[in-house]
Image: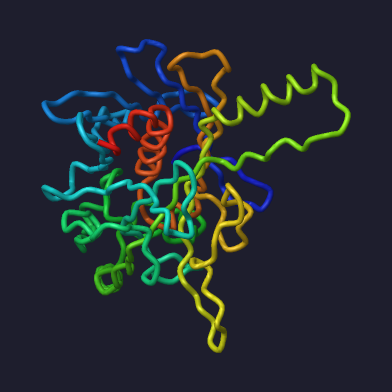
Amino acid sequence: MLPTHHTRNGSPLARYTVQSSDVISDSRVNVMEESSQKVLWYKERFLTEDEIVDHIFDNATTTLCWSVHRPKRGWYIRIRCPTFPPGYFIGLIPVPKTSPYHMEAALSFACRTNLPRPFPSFSEVSLVSSPHSSNSSVDTDITLTEHSSAASHSYPPTPPVPALNVRPASPIEDEEPNPNERSRNFKSKAKSPRPKTQVSQFLLTRHAMNPPVPTEQTSFLSRALSYWKSTEEAQSLSFALSPIPAVTPTTGSSSPGPSLLPIDGPGMHCHPHMPPPLVAFHDRTPAFAFRNTTGMLEIDENEARMLGVHVSFWVTVSLTYLAFLEDRDSYLAALSD
């Protein structure tokens, strides 16, 4: 179990330190525990004949969790798991300008998750402007078996962890259970239904930047500091990952549902219908650092557990979007080719 920190409302919030290597040729990014600085995952870059591939490994077992693919020429971002069927992937795509969630540098993606409690299935609004690819991982309805759910980096999602009823310890620890009782327990487990899944969509956006409030009388030093601060914020790599709320139209109302309402301003946090971020990255890179990113990654573990996808997936998506923001100019140039 990964270490967690509790917010004021009691929701566990896992915090990890993200640190890229200061060696340009290394292209390694470490994700560490906030308290112990123990490396949990790391990303390394490899080149193939046609693609630039980032591999995300579990540091304890050196197991490949996910791979991120983008072409040497052209533009796409595709995330794959070693257990995916050939040709299947999760694609990160730019949010089209016609979408109510469009904003600068925003990307969206869809993946199969457990049915969340607060929101029904997202089916009436699509962020994708192009036709849906038949090779997307959301097209398959693969579910975990009892054996595959033991793997720590499985996808599609695993069911939420059930609540455990802890009984007082029995003084006779070696006593074998009643065979009839064991048979009934096995049958009840075998008859338990699989958790229902859906295709959920998510939004990756930079953090909202509050514009400086002009004052009538300010000194030259104050104006210079304000300009430097606004420039630093504009270059910040902080971002958030949030689930897109489902359309919930009310009967007898002509107003559009939550997902049809435009986002108010440059950031999503001011939108009343957007849920809290599932993942947030806070950029703490020094102002004059070159190709060396440092920051804090926060993941709502309660929400991640309900969605049923391993935390390594959200770490992978975060590292992928961080790399996109770092090298956004080259992405835009490739997109215009």
Task: Give the position of the N terminus as an image quadrant.
Answer: top left
In the rendered image, residue 291, in percent from the top left (x then y), is placed at 43, 17
In the image shown, does 210 or 215 lie closer to the viewer? 215
Q: Is residue 71 above or below residue 257?
A: above
In the image shown, does 313 or 241 lie closer to the viewer? 241
- Residue 92 is left or right of residue 161, and the answer is left
Q: Is residue 112 above or below residue 58?
A: below
- Residue 140 is left or right of residue 269, and the answer is left
In the rendered image, residue 63, in percent from the top left (x then y), is placed at 24, 32
Rendering quarter of residue 197: bottom left
In the rendered image, residue 217, in percent from the top left (x then y), is placed at 88, 28
Q: Is residue 18 above or below residue 195?
A: above
Rendering quarter of residue 231: top right
Which residue does the image show at 56% across and 41% down from the upper left?
207
Which residue does the image show at 64% across and 54% down from the upper left?
270
The residue most toward the bottom is 252
In the rendered image, residue 202, in percent from the top left (x then y), is placed at 41, 54
Which residue does the image show at 13% across and 50% down from the upper left?
85
Applied colour scheme: rainbow
Which residue does the image show at 56% across and 33% down from the upper left?
282
Task: Give the position of the C terminus as an image quadrant.
Answer: top left
Rendering quarter of residue 285: top right
- Residue 224 is left or right of residue 121, and the answer is right
